[in-house]
Image (cartoon, helix red, strand yellow):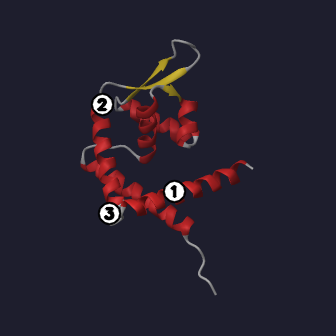
Amino acid sequence: MSRPRQGGFLIAKVHRTGGRVFARMLRERGLEINPAQGRILFVLWQEGPMTINEIARRVSLGKSTLTSGIDGLEKRGQVVRVRSKEDRRKILIELTAQNQGMHALYEEVSAEMSRVFYEGFSNTEITRFEQSLGKILENLEKSESG
């Protein structure tokens, strides 16, 4: 009898454990943000100001988690809500000048996390692994939409 496949279980476990390790590394550098807030900041660093709905689509967070994450970041002076100049009905979430220091530290921790994550892997193994994960994600997205 063959052993059941454990890919989904292992991916979930890696996700949870990786999140805890990443949060600890951030805390050690004085950054008190949760994983949801990290995802929000990451998309803003990559793409600039956007509406809450645009952020929600990119980070796959529920409205309440997203709103509380943005509220927490706003209280710490990392983001602000501003009215769009093109459409006054739209509220954009923007990074503050204070956020620049956080971005640099976050990038430093991300690089360290990648080193931990891929320790002992060759470049070929990393490439193959990431291609396999991409294929799994593609399969799941196809299944999700239909």
* First-in-chain label (3 vs 1): 3
Instruction: Give the alpha-carbon distance from disc 2 to disc 3, as whole Å.
Output: 29 Å
Residues at badges 2 and 3 in contact (C-beta under 8 Å)? no
Instruction: Assess disc 2: are there few (<14), some (14-19) or many (≥20) residues with their C-alpha within 10 Å of its C-alpha.
Output: few
Q: Position of residue 144 (x, y in %)?
A: 69, 51
Horizontal side of residue 91 vs 140, given as left or right:
left
For mark 2, what is the residue? 100
Q: Which residue is mark 1?
A: 131
Q: Amino acid at mark 1?
A: Gln
Residue 2 higher or lower than 29, as above or below: below
Above or below — where is 29 with respect to 76? Answer: below
2 or 3: tag closer to the N-terminus: 2
Residue 102 location, quadrant: top left
For residue 146, side relative to residue 55 (left or right): right
Q: Nearer the observer, disc 1 or disc 2?
A: 1
- How far from the left and from the top, in percent, is residue 69? 46, 38
Residue that mark 3 sits on: 119
Image quadrant where one finds the N terminus: bottom right
Tell me which amino acid carries mark 2.
Answer: Gln
Residue at 34% x, 32% y is 76
Point 61% across, 52% down: residue: 138
How far from the left and from the top, in percent, is residue 53?
Answer: 58, 31
